[in-house]
Image (spheres, rainbow, N blue to C red):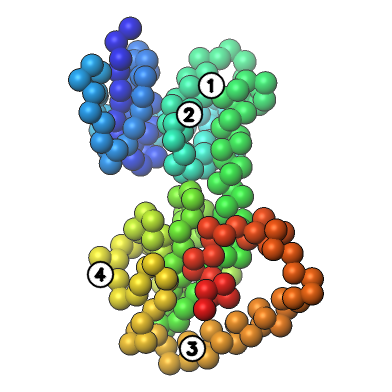
């Protein structure tokens, strides 16, 4: 069996296009990887699969028909984990789904791939839930609320419904500094943005004085005072705090970085 490796553009549509290509050409890939990941292998055949939305929609609709809309969204969430090997996991999972004669196969938790897809999606959902409380906005001089984050998974799209509902009367940007893109809400719609030359320091997440609203420092001190007032030292439990608020998320929390 030839060692075939499939490459795609890194998007979910691109991945579903790759799944279509693999089925259509009866391929058995040994590795699936995005184009940003450089792979040099003289002994493997690397096939670059172009994104085709018509084909990706056929796979998506086929997945919904074979399982359910809820399960299809679960696959998308698992893909956004960006965990090593997630593409091959989902390839095995989808191959089993589309070739199985059992309509409820996707609910078979005894299958290791079914179980792993569910667990992977749960990791992403858990981080989304955490960031509902870990996002800290700073007000800019032009009245936009800006918040840098650095999540483990690509969760920005999953955060939109919560913050669009909660801050519907404010213009805001939540920016993923690791993946170098953000979500901008302009009071009506949401769009993806990229910041080529950031005015702020993405290492600390702090905006410089020249771009901050003049009241921002006052609000920051109020927030820190509030945090101090509810943080009862006599009942401090650092182990529990680290479990509920992992240290890797402290980077952009003003109450933890002064």
Give the alpha-carbon distance from disc 3 to disc 4, as whole Å.
23 Å
Give the alpha-carbon distance from disc 4 to disc 2, as whole Å.
36 Å
Residue, x 60% and y 57% (percent of image)?
A: 246
Q: Quadrant of residue 23?
A: top left
Q: Residues within 10 Å of mark 2 (few under 14, many from 20)?
A: many
Residue, x 50% and y 60% (percent of image)?
A: 160
Horizontal side of 230 relative to 254 (left or right) equals: right
| Foreground label between 4 and 1 | 4
Give the alpha-carbon distance from disc 4 to disc 1, as whole Å.
45 Å
Give the alpha-carbon distance from disc 3 to disc 1, as whole Å.
54 Å
Residue, x 34% and y 32% (percent of image)?
A: 33
Q: Which residue is mark 3?
A: 217
Asked if the residues shown at circle 2 and circle 1 are in contact, with their CB atoms under 8 angstroms apart, the answer is no
The N terminus: image quadrant: top left
Q: Which mark is residue 97?
A: 1
Residue, x 67% and y 25% (percent of image)?
A: 109
Horizontal side of 20 relative to 197 (left or right) equals: right
**Residue 74 pos. (x, y %):** 56, 38
Give the alpha-carbon distance from disc 2 to disc 1, as whole Å.
10 Å
């Amino acid at each position: 069996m030839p060692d075939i490796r499939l490459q795609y553009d890194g998007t979910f549509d691109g991945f579903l296009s790759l799944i279509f290509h693999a089925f259509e050409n009866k391929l058995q890939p040994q590795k699936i990887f995005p184009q940003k990941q450089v792979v040099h292998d003289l002994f493997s055949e690397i096939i670059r699969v172009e994104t085709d939305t018509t084909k990706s929609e056929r796979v998506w609709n086929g997945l919904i028909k074979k399982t359910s809309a809820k399960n299809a969204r679960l696959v998308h969430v698992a893909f956004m984990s960006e965990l090593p090997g997630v593409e091959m996991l989902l390839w095995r999972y989808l191959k089993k789904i589309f070739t199985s004669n059992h309509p409820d196969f996707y609910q078979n938790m005894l299958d290791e791939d079914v179980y792993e897809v569910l667990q992977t999606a749960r990791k992403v959902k858990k981080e989304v839930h955490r960031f509902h409380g870990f996002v800290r906005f700073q007000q800019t001089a032009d009245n936009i609320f800006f918040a840098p984050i650095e999540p483990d998974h690509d969760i920005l799209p999953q955060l939109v419904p919560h913050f669009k509902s909660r801050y519907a009367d404010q213009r805001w940007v939540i920016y993923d500094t690791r993946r170098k893109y953000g979500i901008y809400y302009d009071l009506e719609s949401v769009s993806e943005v990229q910041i080529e030359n950031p005015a702020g320091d993405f290492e600390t997440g702090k905006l410089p004085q020249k771009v901050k609203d003049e009241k921002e420092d006052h609000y920051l001190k109020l927030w820190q005072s509030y945090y101090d007032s509810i943080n009862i030292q006599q009942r401090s439990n650092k182990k529990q705090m680290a479990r509920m608020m992992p240290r890797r998320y402290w980077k952009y929390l003003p109450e933890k970085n002064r």
